[in-house]
Image (cartoon, rainbow, N blue to C red):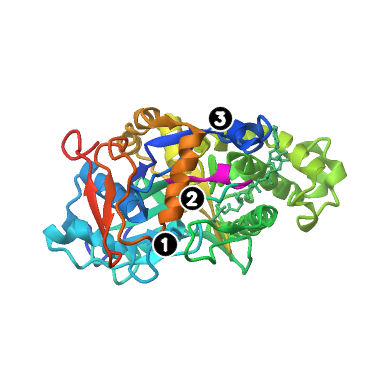
């Protein structure tokens, strides 16, 4: 434990744990089942598989599982946690926080001195939780212990165009000083605004109300604003770095991922920003054949197909080298909502050889409808051994991903109906199969007549970790 009297150095992510559902539906099969044209979900949206939860899992169980696994895998004592923040938009109770449910895990240790509760704004809550955790570490309130930032959601849509953009998952991040992944100080750019692009006004339903087209415009315009603000902040904070911020400044760029195709378009969008921010004399050399966009503006181009295509082509190499690998889990699991952008971080860490990320800068864009968005950057430690050890902690992810069970679209649709019918039912005993869950998974045992939820855990394989 670090001393409480010193300003902690290099605050960031010390460990990260990811969780996704043990069952999925195949997007090609879903296209056929939904009567969508072949390729709409797989090529048009860029999605291969969609993870989903039966009525056996809810946001509490996802968080219980991911926090337990992180503490067990990293041998962290329950007494070593001084702050725990949850970011989620999957609300099962309008008053009682998920954080308070997680306190069950700490009961035996006697540690009740843990600050933090839940934060909600669509997919942004996870970033708010992480920022809160970092802020605590960097404040006079810090008592020398670790913080945990937890994000979890079950992303489900009513039947229709949005359903294939569902998913589910959870991420827990252990936050402390001298981290292998450091959040760069002073380099956070935020944009918040009132919008009705995606929201959940019907408290009796799990499904959101979505204006799909508006949501894409809001996402892209928040990206524009955050990028430009990040650029300005960078100039202030890092005046010694010679060149202005462009995509060249980042070794990897990760995004909140509602569906993979939007992220590919987002890289193109950032490239268009770089183009506009390049002086006209230099444009011709750097962006050959794009002079027809010299007078284009950000505002007028969100759905300009010609421009979108031109900058997708222009940024294709950047996408392939800096972003594509971070889409592995998003492509295989779908939109996890709050954990989505952090599943992008995990995907990057498991797809790149660790030595290629040492001392590198990762740009992060987090977006939550309604809307709240931030762009910030993470610096990977220059200590190669430390980073290798950190990255190897994620060796379980790919084998776990390939051990999932495929479920037919018919069964998926039936399980969605069960969730839909019994949302908030009490008393209620779930019917979803327990045997299908991964080892060490918490699941909902029952809900009593007073809506009190009880959880049990599937057996773990070895020393408490699946
Ligand atoms: P849609 O309107 O039915 O789809 O729903 P579409 O007709 O626009 O088609 C999608 C793409 O597939 C198009 O590509 C089609 O051309 C293509 P584009 O032209 O845009 O590049 N396509 C095909 N491609 C190949 N073969 C084919 C074929 N057919 C069509 N046969 C929409 C799409 C995303 C709107 C819908 O799924 C939706 O509403 N999803 C939920 C909202 C969403 O994900 N918004 C994203 C930004 S907002 C956000 O990220 C926040 C969020 O995560 C929530 C939170 O913050 O909590 C959602």
- Mark 3 or 1 closer to N-term? 3
The secondary element bearing badge 3 is classed as helix
Q: Which residue is painted at 22% across and 49% down in the image? A: 456
Residue 174's x, y, as percent? 31, 51
Mark 3 → mark 2, Cα distance in angstroms? 19 Å
**Image: magenta residue range:** 160-168
Membership of 357 in magenta stretch: no
Tell which tag, 3 or 2, sits nearer the viewer: 3
Tell which tag, 3 or 1, sits nearer the viewer: 3
Q: Residues within 10 Å of mark 1 (few under 14, many from 20)?
A: some
Q: Which residue is painted at 36% across and 71% down in the image? A: 95
Quadrant where the C terminus is found in the figure: top left
Q: Which numbered disc covers residue 155?
A: 2
Ligand 1 shows up in which quadrant of the image? Answer: top right
Q: Is mark 2 within 8 Å of ligand 1?
A: yes
Residue marked by disc 1: 91
Residue marked by disc 3: 29
- Mark 1 or 2 closer to N-term? 1
The secondary element bearing badge 1 is classed as loop
- Mark 3 or 2 closer to N-term? 3
Residue 18's x, y, as percent? 36, 43
Residue 320 shows up from this direction: no
Residue 420's x, y, as percent? 46, 53
Residue 69 shows up from this direction: yes
Q: Which residue is painted at 22% across and 38% down in the image? A: 465
């Amino acid at each position: 434990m670090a001393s409480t009297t010193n300003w902690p150095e290099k605050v960031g992510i010390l460990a990260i744990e990811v969780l996704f559902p043990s069952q999925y539906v195949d997007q090609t099969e879903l296209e056929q089942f939904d009567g969508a044209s072949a390729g709409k979900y797989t090529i048009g949206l860029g999605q291969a598989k969609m993870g989903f939860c039966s009525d056996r899992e809810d946001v509490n169980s996802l968080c219980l599982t991911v926090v337990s696994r992180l503490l067990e895998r990293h041998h962290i004592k329950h007494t070593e946690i001084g702050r725990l923040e949850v970011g989620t938009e999957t609300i099962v109770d309008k008053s009682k926080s998920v954080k308070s449910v997680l306190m069950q895990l700490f009961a035996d240790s006697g540690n009740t001195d843990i600050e933090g509760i839940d934060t909600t704004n669509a997919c942004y809550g996870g970033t708010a939780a992480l920022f809160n955790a970092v802020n605590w570490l960097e404040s006079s309130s810090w008592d020398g212990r670790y913080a945990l930032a937890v994000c979890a959601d079950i992303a489900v849509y009513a039947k229709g165009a949005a359903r294939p953009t569902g998913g589910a998952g959870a991420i827990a991040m252990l936050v402390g000083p001298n981290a292998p992944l450091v959040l760069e100080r002073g380099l956070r750019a935020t944009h918040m605004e009132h919008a009705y692009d995606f929201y959940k006004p019907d408290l009796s339903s799990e499904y959101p109300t979505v204006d799909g087209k508006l949501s894409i415009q809001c996402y892209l315009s928040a990206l524009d604003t955050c990028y430009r603000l990040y650029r300005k902040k960078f100039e202030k904070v890092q005046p010694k770095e010679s060149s202005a911020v462009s995509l060249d400044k980042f070794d990897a760029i990760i995004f909140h991922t509602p569906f993979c195709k939007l992220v590919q378009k987002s890289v193109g969008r950032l490239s268009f920003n770089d183009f506009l921010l390049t002086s006209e004399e230099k444009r011709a050399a750097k962006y050959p054949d794009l002079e027809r966009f010299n007078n284009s503006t950000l505002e007028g181009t969100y759905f300009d197909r010609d421009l979108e295509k031109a900058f997708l082509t222009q940024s294709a190499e950047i996408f392939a080298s800096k972003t594509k690998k971070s889409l592995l889990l998003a492509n295989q699991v779908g939109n996890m909502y709050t954990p989505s952008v952090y599943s992008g971080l995990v995907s990057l860490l498991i797809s790149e050889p660790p030595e290629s990320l040492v001392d590198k800068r990762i740009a992060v864009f987090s977006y939550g409808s309604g809307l709240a968005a931030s762009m910030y950057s993470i610096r990977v430690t220059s200590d190669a051994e430390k980073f290798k050890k950190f990255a190897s902690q994620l060796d379980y992810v790919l084998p776990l991903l390939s051990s999932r069970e495929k479920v037919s679209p018919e069964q998926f649709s039936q399980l969605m109906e069960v969730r839909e019918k019994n949302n908030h039912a009490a008393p209620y005993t779930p019917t979803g199969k327990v045997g299908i869950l991964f080892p060490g998974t918490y699941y909902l045992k029952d809900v009593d007549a007073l809506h009190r939820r009880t959880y049990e855990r599937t057996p773990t394989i070895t020393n408490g970790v699946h």
